[in-house]
Amino acid sequence: MCEILHKFLMGLREFIKEYFLGFWDYETPKVMVVKNTTLGVIYRSVQFLVITYFIWYVFINEKAYQESETRPESSVYTLMKGTAVRGDDILDTVEYVRPSEGGDVISAILRREVTYDQRQGTCAEHCKVTNANCTTDTDCVKGEVDFDGHGIRTGICVQYLNHTFKTCEIQTWCPIEEYAAVSREPALEAAINFTVFIRNSIHFPRFKVLRGNIKDAPSKRDMQKYLNKCHYNEEKEPYCPNFRLGYIAEQASQNFNELCKTGGVIGVFINWKCNLDLDPSHCKPTYSFRRLDLRKDQANSGYYSRFAKYYSKDGVESRTLIKAYGIRLDVIVHGHAGKFSPIPTIIGTVTAMTSVGICTIICDWIMLTFIDKNEVYSDRKFDEIIKEPAVPTPTELSYINSFGSNHSDLSEGVPL
């Protein structure tokens, strides 16, 4: 046992000694020209790919020579315009827009379900609410609130409308929406021609550049005249901030009639990609549209909200409850600006030059692994010098052809 331990310690000592001495060795590359066409083609091909990648993708496409800013300051103002007729009623923005003047979120009501004459009182809880069904008063806990229910339980078990079973009585706005006489109004299909005015200003503080998505005009009067008649078109009117709801639904690949039934949330994406090496006037926004709510999940798809209109009837406070289905527009702004800077240019250039060294590593690996069957290349590539020679010897540039022979093409006695 002691002998084994002794051998182990001696071996460990030799390993540490060799590692310590080898740590202070100096390695320098040796120039060796290999006359092998296959290896040469691989080497130049890899070089071409690396150089092409850096020139085309890194410098031209990604603009690695620019200093960039990706978190600009932005403001959004929205305003919906349009008038619709429903029967004898004229509907304006106060009726169907929430809020009438918005920020980055605005919605239009397309269909309503109305519950009239609700009053504070007591009535039976809906039968589909958890633990609402009962047989005696002991099944109903007074003061208990079910967050899936509609009010506070009074502790009394009452008959559920005209049915034979009973549910717990609650104190709330009665009658509750689920079994009240709900008036379902027709969809506001005329809203397809409503317009949304979207004003967006963006500021890149690093470059002190401020841009807007509205076309400049000589005077305020000319500006107002232009805004009153224009509608956004990607090719003809890229600076017009007026968007038809029908156009937004179409660009988001949605059927407007279906949106009138269930509602929906659509994202309006404003993308600013600015090359500030050019004049700032070339910095223009692009728009894209996409539906954001989950259509596959029926329980969470669509968009609706509830609000009430309060009034006094026979001296009793009453309300009309409105469940409104509509389109909600979320305006989302992305910005990226870049401008030439020497620091990223130097970093990108040095990275490109360094990456060219990958070609040598790949070709060395191919040469020593697949071509060097007789270890001819490895014997010439790796030399170990223990001490400095007493007499300086001339350096040779060696050439090795594909058959493994070597010779010097330099004149005799002429050092490199």
Image: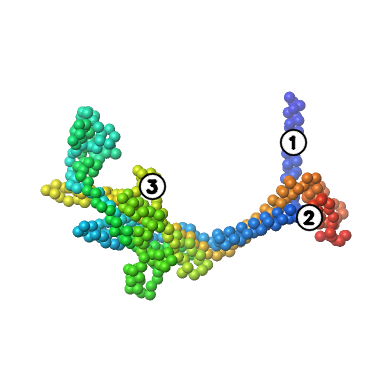
Residue at the disc numbered 1: 13
User: Which numbered disc, 1 or 2, marks the residue closer to the eye?
Assistant: 2
Comes first in the chain, label 2 or label 3: 2
Comes first in the chain, label 1 or label 2: 1
- Distance between the Cα atoms at labels 1 and 2? 44 Å
| Left or right of 104, for residue 48 | right
Q: Which amino acid is tagged 2?
A: Lys
At a point 27% along the width and 32% down the height, the residue shown is 131
User: Which numbered disc, 2 or 3, marks the residue closer to the eye?
Assistant: 3
Residue at the disc numbered 2: 35
Query: Pointer 3: residues within 10 angstroms few (<14), some, or many (20+)?
Result: few
Q: Which amino acid is tagged 1?
A: Arg
* Location of residue 355 by image quarter: bottom right
Report if the CB atoms under discs 1 and 3 are less than 8 Å apart.
no
Comes first in the chain, label 1 or label 3: 1
Name the disc covering residue 272, or none.
none
User: Which numbered disc, 1 or 3, marks the residue closer to the eye?
Assistant: 3
At a point 19% along the width and 42% down the height, the residue shown is 174
**Percent x, y for residue 189?**
29, 56
At a point 28% along the width and 50% down the height, the residue shown is 324
**Where 200 sits versus 18, above or below?**
below
Name the disc covering residue 295, or none.
3
Q: Secondary structure at mark 1?
A: helix
Query: Pointer 2: residues within 10 angstroms few (<14), some, or many (20+)?
Result: some
Is residue 287 among the parts visible in the rendering?
yes
Q: Quadrant of the C terminus?
A: bottom right
At a point 33% along the width and 53% down the height, the residue shown is 257
Q: In front here: 232 or 189? A: 189
**Percent x, y for residue 58?**
58, 59
Q: Secondary structure at mark 3?
A: loop
| Left or right of 270, for residue 91 | left
Is residue 357 among the parts visible in the rendering?
no
